[in-house]
Amino acid sequence: MSHLQASELFSVKGRVVVVTGGGSGLGRTIAHALAVNGVSKVFVLGRREEALQQTATQDPNVIIPVKCDVSSKESLDAAYEAIAAQTDHIDVLFANSGIMGPDMPMPKPKADGSMPSITEVRDQLYNVPMTEFTNVMDVNVTGVYYTVLAFLPLLDAANSKRPAPQPNVLSTPTPQVILTGSLAGFNRKPPYSYAYNVSKAAVHHLTKMLSTTFTSYNIRFNGISPGLYQSEMAQHSFNDNGVPDAGISDGSFPVDMIPLTRAGSQQDFAGVVVWMTSASGGYLNGNILLTDGGRLSVMPSTY
Ligand SMILES: NC(=O)c1ccc[n+]([C@@H]2O[C@H](COP(=O)([O-])OP(=O)(O)OC[C@H]3O[C@@H](n4cnc5c(N)ncnc54)[C@H](OP(=O)(O)O)[C@@H]3O)[C@@H](O)[C@H]2O)c1
């Protein structure tokens, strides 16, 4: 029964991985979790070299910084060439880079309970410059899409390295792209940022479209949709709720906000990442995995 032991089920030994946004937050957790569990290489991509170097300090032999702006094809091409010079394939690509959108809250109801006028709603939302909306799309949607396209040849190369199938022996997983979506992509409530929520809904749909398109090429596409995890991007939610730390102990957040009353932890995220990257994640294709402590279940869908 050794094939059912956790050490076999969740082994990521020897895998070669690329993580965009690997210089901070969830991307850094992905890189650290995979490095500590025995992948052979994790290339971490982002614009800030210092942040990437900081991620790599955990294991400089395995974690390799590559400067890259995912919103530029030239930069993606340069990153691809730098990586292709160091490996002949990649097993998993995490298209994880993302930015928060501009603050676009709906005006609040008035003291007497009446709704803001349509002019007030229009003024508040229309005042946000168009470029702030499109900047979010450039990184979160266009950047993710072109990241995937850029790395297809190295992903495809992983297929040619898979051993020939043996009767009644589980084949090694096919290459996979894991896109970082968001709980926000499911959220219909007047959001913090229309641009951000729309961008993440697009990432979810992109994941499904790509998984359909590339079935015949044996490249799998799955998504992870985090709820609230402490990071540079998410820090405002911790500040707004007076949470001074990572918020991972029970009671850190109100139950009507997050049923488990806490933020996601590095362990919560690392567990999902290791599982999806491992042999036992090899049957996943076209899924969006929500890890949100039940938050979506209690999100109001109306104003
Ligand atoms: N934390 C949460 O609660 C949460 C919830 C749902 C979804 N997410 C998603 O998780 C992903 C990671 O975010 P995070 O929470 O870990 O926040 P974070 O620490 O702010 O990470 C965002 C990463 O994206 C990179 N990035 C931004 N623009 C880029 C560009 N043009 N080219 C390359 N890299 C770029 C940043 O690196 P550089 O600035 O160095 O380029 C940074 O490392 C994002 O897609 C985010 O939307 C997070």
Image (cartoon, helix red, strand yellow):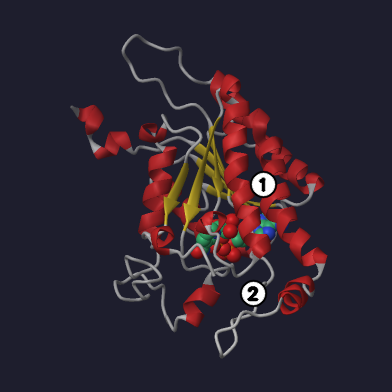
Name which residue lies at 71% across and 44% down: 79
Residue furthest out toward the bottom: 111
- From this view, report whether residue 166 is shown above or below residue 156: above
The mark nearer the N terminus, 1 or 2, is 2
Name which residue lies at 62% across and 79% down: 115
Rendering coords of residue 148 (x, y %): 66, 39
From the viewer's side, name the closer residue of 251 and 109: 109
Crowding at mark 2 (Cα within 10 Å: few <14, some 14-19, many 20+): some
Rendering coords of residue 99 (x, y %): 65, 62
143 lies left or right of 223: right
Asked if one can make out residue 202 in the rendered structure from this viewpoint, the answer is: yes
- From this view, report whether residue 18 is shown above or below residue 100: above
Disc 1 to disc 2, C-alpha distance:
28 Å
Would you name the residue on which mark 1 appears?
144
Rendering coords of residue 254 (x, y %): 36, 76
87 lies left or right of 139: left
Name the amino acid type tagged 1.
Val
The C terminus lies in which quarter of the figure? bottom right
Which quarter of the picture shows residue 248? bottom left
Residue furthest out toward the left: 1
Which of the labelled discs sits on residue 106, or is there none?
Answer: 2
Instruction: Identify the secondary structure beneath mark 1.
Output: helix
